[in-house]
Image (cartoon, rainbow, N blue to C red):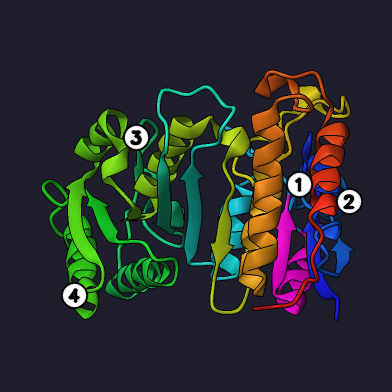
Amino acid sequence: MAHRVTLIPGDGIGPELAEATRRVLDASGVAFDWEVVDAGEACIAEYGTPLPEHVLESIRRNRIALKGPITTPVGAGFRSVNVTLRQTLKLYANLRPARSIEGLTTRYEDVDLVICRENTEDLYAGIEHMVGPDAAESIKIITRAASERIARFAFDYAVANHRHKVTAVHKANIMKLSDGLFLESCRYVAADYDGRIEFEDRIVDNMCMQLVQNPGQFDVLVLPNLYGDIVSDLCAGLVGGLGVAPGANIGEDGAVFEPVHGSAPKYAGQNRANPTAMILSGVLMLRHLGYPDIAARVELAVRDVIAEGATVTHDLGGEAGTSQFADAIIERLRATAAPAVPA
């Protein structure tokens, strides 16, 4: 049976990345029926919005989506499509693994972190307004329900994936009520996993310093929305940058998988963008659909091609185009083909 998946190519380099990823996933042995719908800047002229209602309807119907990068204007213009998707579809958990890749020169080796970011509230709730002509106010929302939900997601992920520790990240020393509630909620949930998963907490600024000094001391991180956004980019930097960082947005009724880098419009149509982050987001999707062995095989193919270095994109030190990089991964997959049977 083919899995019907909403495919949103996105802006800029997005369509090239989406096509490369689609071809790799089709070569994995899992059958997909792709429903392609457009969202982003190009939709505004026709629909008056970068996120037309039929796109949301497609995701609700299929319950699974794979999305390319979409432009988010800075300081003005339309609201982030990514934030709107997460809030509208109640995709409360943002999952971003950060794992070292052989063949990429970084300052660290053997980094293996998983960031679980609360995805629906905090300052990203978008409750802000002007206070007179020269001041603006944003309201930070933290609730017990959302905090306990993301904490449980992090602990359940740790148990299911044989991780050993969850670290809650906060600023409860200053924001004693809001971040204090987040920390209290994490401690409450942690008690249910006592003896199975170690729990600790870190103040967010200290956490950033310790990640740079010794990332190997951490395992699974659980954070409110804003800190999660910042720290997950920091962790991506430890393993090679946003070009190799996958992402997933997961809720009770659906999931959207996406790379977290920008749309890089100046490189659009040049067949030079690196599709690694979107392909690895597809790997997260395969795991979500119940194909852990196939997901591992696709991820290994990506890692092997990067480690060999012969057919990689410019940013990875090679001369291959987007499509040639995907071709190399597909060739590796075909050499290790196996039946795609859900776990």
Prevailing secondary structure class for the magenta stretch in the rendered image: helix
- Residue 69 in view (yes/no): no
> Sequence-wise, which precedes: disc 2 or disc 3?
2
Picture residue at 78% right of the left edge, 71% below the top: 340
Q: Disc 2 versus disc 3: distance between alpha carbons?
A: 35 Å
- Upstream in the sequence, badge 2 or badge 4? 2
Residue 120 percent across, percent down from the top left: 46, 62
Residue type pointed to by label 3 = Ala
Could you tell whether 205 is left or right of 324 in the image?
Answer: left
**How far across and down, in percent of the image, does residue 288 sit?**
61, 69
Residue 65 shown in magenta? yes
Q: Is residue 254 above or below residue 110?
A: below
Viewer-proximal residue among 51 and 221: 221
- Residue bearing mark 3: 135
Question: First in sequence: mark 1 or mark 3?
Answer: 1
Hey, what amino acid is under mark 1? Gly
In magenta, the rendered stretch is 52-67
User: Given this view, does label 1 or label 4 mark the residue nearer the observer?
Assistant: 4
Q: Nearer the viewer, residue 76 or 318?
A: 318
In the rendered image, residue 308 lying in the magenta stretch gets the answer: no
Q: Are the residues flagged by discs 1 and 2 in contact, CB closer than 8 Å?
A: no
Tell me the SS state at disc 2: helix
Q: Quadrant of residue 245?
A: top right
Q: Which residue is mark 1?
A: 40
Mark 1 vs mark 2, foreground winner is 1
For image coordinates 83% across by 38% down, the residue present is 328
Q: Nearer the viewer, mark 2 or mark 3?
A: 2
Spatial distance from mark 2 to mark 4, Cα to Cα? Answer: 54 Å
The answer to whether residue 265 of the structure is visible from this angle is yes
Q: Which residue is mark 2?
A: 46
Residue assigned mark 4: 194
